[in-house]
Image: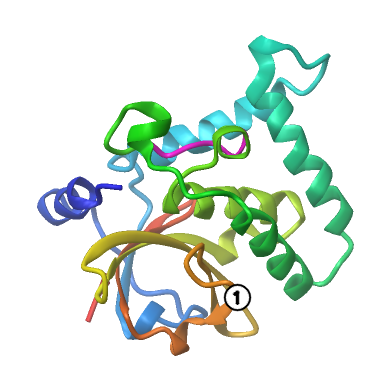
Amino acid sequence: MRWWFLILVPALVIPPLGRARADAPGLFGTSEKESSNMSLFTNWNQAVARAVEEKSKLAGTCDDKKMNACHYKVLLDFTEKIRDKDDLFKIKNVNDFMNRAKYVTDQINYNAPDYWASPGQFIEKQGDCEDYAIAKYIALKLAGFPADKMRVVAVQDLNLKVGHAVLAVYVDGKALILDNQIKQVVDSSSVKHYQPVFSINEKAWWRHTK
């Protein structure tokens, strides 16, 4: 994936930023500033919109024209089975479910340098790091986990020197990390090699600085 565009654009065109959330610890030891201006994040907005469209197409039979919706139903059926479980059970099972997918680059899947897939597209074609994170976000939301306690996080992997994406979820004052490169769900405080650039959900985004 190519984070360079999304890293540079927020640095050059800075929307009004608010204060850090008092109930959310700074990810990976950073300070964070919040903005509700979502206009810069086209890939994210389009992925969320496609997820809504996939869900809306579930009424009716599955056919070739609705194939992404059919794959989305796999996700819906899975999350329905865990809706009545506690938060940690949901988080672990969603992480395990999505991490079974094979890593496939955007260039192979979409003949594009960077594409943020919807959950239906991810279940059909698998995907790269942000696709895992988005699918986990939508799955947990469907399972009843609050969307405002989740963020897709764009990070710089300081070991591999590449961009990466994970999902952060907030439980009992801790930020837990769901990562396709780490088998278990881990506390963000135990991860030392990620430097977050920004994080995002459907309501806002956050800039992270040391």
Residue 149 inside the magenta-drawn segment: no
Q: Quadrant of residue 16?
A: bottom left
Does the stretch in magenta take in 117?
yes
Image coords of residue 21 (percent x, y): 44, 74
Q: Is residue 39 left or right of residue 119?
A: left
- The residue wearing badge 1 is 185
Identify the colour scheme used: rainbow
**Is residue 180 something that shows in the picture?**
yes
Q: Is residue 138 left or right of residue 153?
A: right
Q: Is residue 206 visible?
A: no
Rendered location of residue 110, percent (x, y):
39, 28
Residue 187 location (% of width, % of height): 53, 84
Which residues fall within the magenta stretch? 115-120
Q: Which residue is located at x 35 percent, y 85 percent?
A: 192
Q: How many marks?
A: 1
The foreground one among 133 and 84 is 133
Residue at horizontal 37 percent and vertical 74 percent from the top = 20
Could you say which quadrant of the image residue 153 lies in?
Answer: bottom left
**What amino acid is labelled 1 in the image?**
Val
Q: Is residue 9 left or right of residue 56?
A: left
Pointer 1 local density, CA inside 10 Å: few below 14, some 14–19, many at least 20: some
Say left or right for 129 vs 16: right
